[in-house]
Image (tube, rainbow, N blue to C red):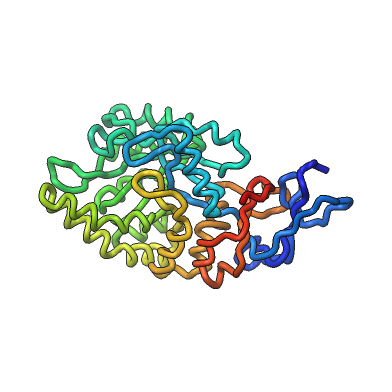
Amino acid sequence: MSDQPVLHVKGRVLVGPRDVRDELWVVGGRVSYDRPSGARDVRTVRGWALPGLVDAHCHVGLDAHGPVDAETAEKQALTDREAGTLLMRDAGSPSDTRWIDDRADLPKIIRAGRHIARTRRYIRNYAWEIEPDDLVAYVAQEARRGDGWVKLVGDWIDREVGDLSPCWPREAVEAAIAEAHRLGARVTAHCFAENSLRDLVESGIDCVEHATGLTEDLIPLFAERGVAIVPTLVNIATFPQLAAGGESKFPNWSAHMRRLHERRYDTVRSAYDAGIPVFVGTDAGGSLPHGLVAAEVAELVTAGIPPIEALAATSWSARAWLGRPGLEEGAPADLVVYDEDPRAEVGVLAAPRRVVLNGAVVE
């Protein structure tokens, strides 16, 4: 038996939305449902246990101005850990955060490499800024550097047009997504507007971030192709402020951003009702702070997604989508314990009682 103390979690263990067990054991940093024999150093934690929460869209090592130092990136990861987020899909970062993988006390990260954007069509210091002829090569580069994901900037404001517009011609997107898939990587894209979506989905994209431009004619296409969305509603809440800042220079863009914001809840609920997979992501690490996963789950519920499904979008379903285990026998013991049943009230997520990462209770 490992020298690591045995942890006994008692109460209600939410292995799945309806698979509830009375207890689990953590032995050698891994989940077990068999009582270990001969265990002497046992710590007991009581409450409602969930798999470690998932933030499927955040940015570690990034702030509003670009890459940050390791100390700042560590604070970002620790803030997420304290919120119960133990698995993150980093949806684009110019920072090298591989050192985090060597830290058993920090959340696990699935990286999408660095954003790939059109020249002068994204936030400064964030992305590789290239032209369409180079898209396949950069997608291949980031597919090899990432953890099974690549992140494109699908649309952004075009200053000559004065509004959001697609960044890439369809033929470039088709070739790039095909190359990523050939290399075993999935592709996601930042998309606010309506007119960037069809080409991306019909070209085989796997996920769309934000997806505020989803319309009635596009929703069946997403559902048919199984394209997931990560709405980042806590970020979409900033659209009115952004619109106000650009009103004088880009009035059409400002009006467009306000319309996208106004219908955000209807968009997400319609996507969910159509069977489109919806997952929790906060977009933390740009202009937003880390640790917002509970707020995003609450936003999904406000949009009309049933609480149990909003909870699944940051736990069981999200982990399965990302190919990471939950609380299965033998899985790394990454879990969060609450005083009450989070299925009944998702607001409980904002106050973890205990966080367990790699079998260790972190305070």
Where does residue 291 sit, x and y in percent of width and height?
Answer: 47, 52
Residue located 88% across and 52% down the image:
37
Q: What residue occupies the far right of the structure in this picture?
A: 38
**In terms of image quadrants, where is residue 256?**
bottom left
Image quadrant assignment for residue 179? top left
**Residue 312 visible to an observer of this rendering:** yes
Residue drawn at (54%, 31%) of the image: 99
Q: Quadrant of the N terminus?
A: top right
Q: Is residue 9 left or right of residue 36?
A: left
How many labels, in total?
0
Q: Out of 107 and 219, give the one closest to the viewer.
A: 107
The quadrant holding residue 158 is top left
- Work out whether 174 lies above or below 11: above
Residue sticking out furthest to the bottom: 344
Q: Is residue 179 visible to us here?
A: no
In the foreground, 142 or 69: 69
In the rendered view, does 67 fall on the left or right side of 103? Answer: left
- Which residue is found at the position 48% from the left and 30% from the top? 145
Point 44% across, 55% down: residue: 292
In the image: residue 230, left or right of residue 164: right
Up-down: is 298 above or below 93?
below
- Image position of 330 with respect to 171: above or below: below
At which x and y percent is residue 302?
40, 69
Q: Is 143 left, or right, of 14 in this rendering? A: left
Which percent across, then down, holds residue 171?
29, 37
Q: Residue 102 in the image: state x and y as whole percent.
A: 60, 33
**Front position in the image: 182 or 360:** 360
